């Protein structure tokens, strides 16, 4: 789809998201995009059909002035293109994007594109449960070696990067969920770029699951990462009413390769969801700013509470290395916090039971505040050793702060603590 070309001062993401990536002329002049629910597209001639298939399978390139190549909606459709053209405006350093029908679809499709039997993937733990399950229990059956390394432990990650055999991908999730431990993205990228790569072998790719702080507060592509992945289900969509996934890259070539896998797997996002998600993008910054400001107020006040052991939140980090990474890597601390209650599981459950505003649900990044007990829900697949190593304790409650008034939320947490 059309991009307006600007020679003037580059615009900031908040402006670009409203001015670039959507051409009203391609939607009959409509100020908002039309929804194209078609599964198939009509060709002008058999020659045009032949050319379209040549382009899609990589045998030919799009001709000068040829905007798009529409064949069949498992490969591509206008609402996915519009969403992709718009979202690159939000992710600093990105040149191309792909929309998927959920975050796991983005992760699975991207990993399958670049990993081959015999190769290895380094990943930080704790990582999203589905991602861990996929690497440990699915990729392993295809002869792909998963190498877990503890989030934030730069020395161990660097050693793993240097010693892994046939390393193809380094996948970081930072901050880690639910402990918010941060991994230094730039250091990992530098470490990968310093590897001596034999001729004919491709350099390992650095992928970052940026769901927690991106695209507003953390910019992995600017720090040297190759690919950024999202569960668009969370902050990007923001209303807990749709599933989506996004991949964004510095280089178009990576996106071209993942697109081909997406066409095969059928993991593209459907037109209606693309349209909904595109409409949410201009407010991502407003929603994330608001929940970050309020989460910080709440976290810093609850840190003093007598029933709370500690509050896990970036502005409350005590480890100097974690403080350094946070300051170097993130613009704001974000809307996620975790509370460690003194009484363990019983107190944590009672706290959740007594909440009146915050709802007891997994997921995050919505306008409504959600709270859950990671050890028995999102992270219940961990082994005892993994719980200890990752710091997921019995008393831990994870909170995704929404956009309600923060004083009402604080009152709610305080009354639930009093009752717990
Ligand atoms: C939710 C989530 C995912 C998975 O996304 P879905 O949209 O549920 O498939 C992946 N990574 C992180 C960090 C998540 O929070």
Image (tube, rainbow, N blue to C red):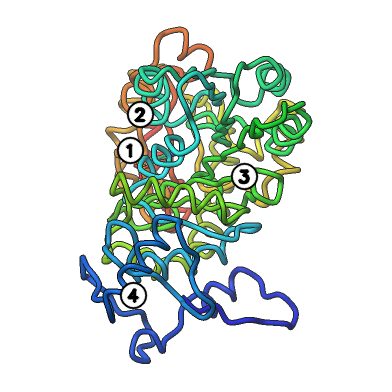
Tell me whether the residue at label 2 lies in contact with that at label 1, contact meaning CB atoms closer than 8 angstroms.
yes
Marks 1 and 3, the one that precedes in the sequence: 3
Q: Nearer the viewer, mark 2 or mark 4?
A: 4
Task: Determine if residue 275 is in view.
Answer: no
Q: Secondary structure at mark 3?
A: loop
* Residue pointed to by mark 3: 226
- Residue at x 27%, y 62% (from the top left corner): 73
Q: Quadrant of ligand 1?
A: top left
* Residue pointed to by mark 4: 48
What quarter of the picture does the C terminus occupy?
top left
Q: Position of residue 322 (x, y in %)?
A: 70, 30
Spatial CA distance of label 3 from label 2 is 28 Å
Task: Determine if residue 376 is in view.
Answer: yes
Spatial CA distance of label 3 from label 4 is 34 Å
> Given the current orientation, which residue lies at the most extreme bottom position?
29
On screen, residue 219 above or below 170 = below
Q: Nearer the viewer, mark 1 or mark 3?
A: 3
Q: Secondary structure at mark 1?
A: loop
Q: Is residue 405 left or right of residue 208?
A: left
Image quadrant in which you'd find residue 377 = top left
Tell me whether the residue at label 1 lies in contact with that at label 4, contact meaning CB atoms closer than 8 angstroms.
no
């Amino acid at each position: 789809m059309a991009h307006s070309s600007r020679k003037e001062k580059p615009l900031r993401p908040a402006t670009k998201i409203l001015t670039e990536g959507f051409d009203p002329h391609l939607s009959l002049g409509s100020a908002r995009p039309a929804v194209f629910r078609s599964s198939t597209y009509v060709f002008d001639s058999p020659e045009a059909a032949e050319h379209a298939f040549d382009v899609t399978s990589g045998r030919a390139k799009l001709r000068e002035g040829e905007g798009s190549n529409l064949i069949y909606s498992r490969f591509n459709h206008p609402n996915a293109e519009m969403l992709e053209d718009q979202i690159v405006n939000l992710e600093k350093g990105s040149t191309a994007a792909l929309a998927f029908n959920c975050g796991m679809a983005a992760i699975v499709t991207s990993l399958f594109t670049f990993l081959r039997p015999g190769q290895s993937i380094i990943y930080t733990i704790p990582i999203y449960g589905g991602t861990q399950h996929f690497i440990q229990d699915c990729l392993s059956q295809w002869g792909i070696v998963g190498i877990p390394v503890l989030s934030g432990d730069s020395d161990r990650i660097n050693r793993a990067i240097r010693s892994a055999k046939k390393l193809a991908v380094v996948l970081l999730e930072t901050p880690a969920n639910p402990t918010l431990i941060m991994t230094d993205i730039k250091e990992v990228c530098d470490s990968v770029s310093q590897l001596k790569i034999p001729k004919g072998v491709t350099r390992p790719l650095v992928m970052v699951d940026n769901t927690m702080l991106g695209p507003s507060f953390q910019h992995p592509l600017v720090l040297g990462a190759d690919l950024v992945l999202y569960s668009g289900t969370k902050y990007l969509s923001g209303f807990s009413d749709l599933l989506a996934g996004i991949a964004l890259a510095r280089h178009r070539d990576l996106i071209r390769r993942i697109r081909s896998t997406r066409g095969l797997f059928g993991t593209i996002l459907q037109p209606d969801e693309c349209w909904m998600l595109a409409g949410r993008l201009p407010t991502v910054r407003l929603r994330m700013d608001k929940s970050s400001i309020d989460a910080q107020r709440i976290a810093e006040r609850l840190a003093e509470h007598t029933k709370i052991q500690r509050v896990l939140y970036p502005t409350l980090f005590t480890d100097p290395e974690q403080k350094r990474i946070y300051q170097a890597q993130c613009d704001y601390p974000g809307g996620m916090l975790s509370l460690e209650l003194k009484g363990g599981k019983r107190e944590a459950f009672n706290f959740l039971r007594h909440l009146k505003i915050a709802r007891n649900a997994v997921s995050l990044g919505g306008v409504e505040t959600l709270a859950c007990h990671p050890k028995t829900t999102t992270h219940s697949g961990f082994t005892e050793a993994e719980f200890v190593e990752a710091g997921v304790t019995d008393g831990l409650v994870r909170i995704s702060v929404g956009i309600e008034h923060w004083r009402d939320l604080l009152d709610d947490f305080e009354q639930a603590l009093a009752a717990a």
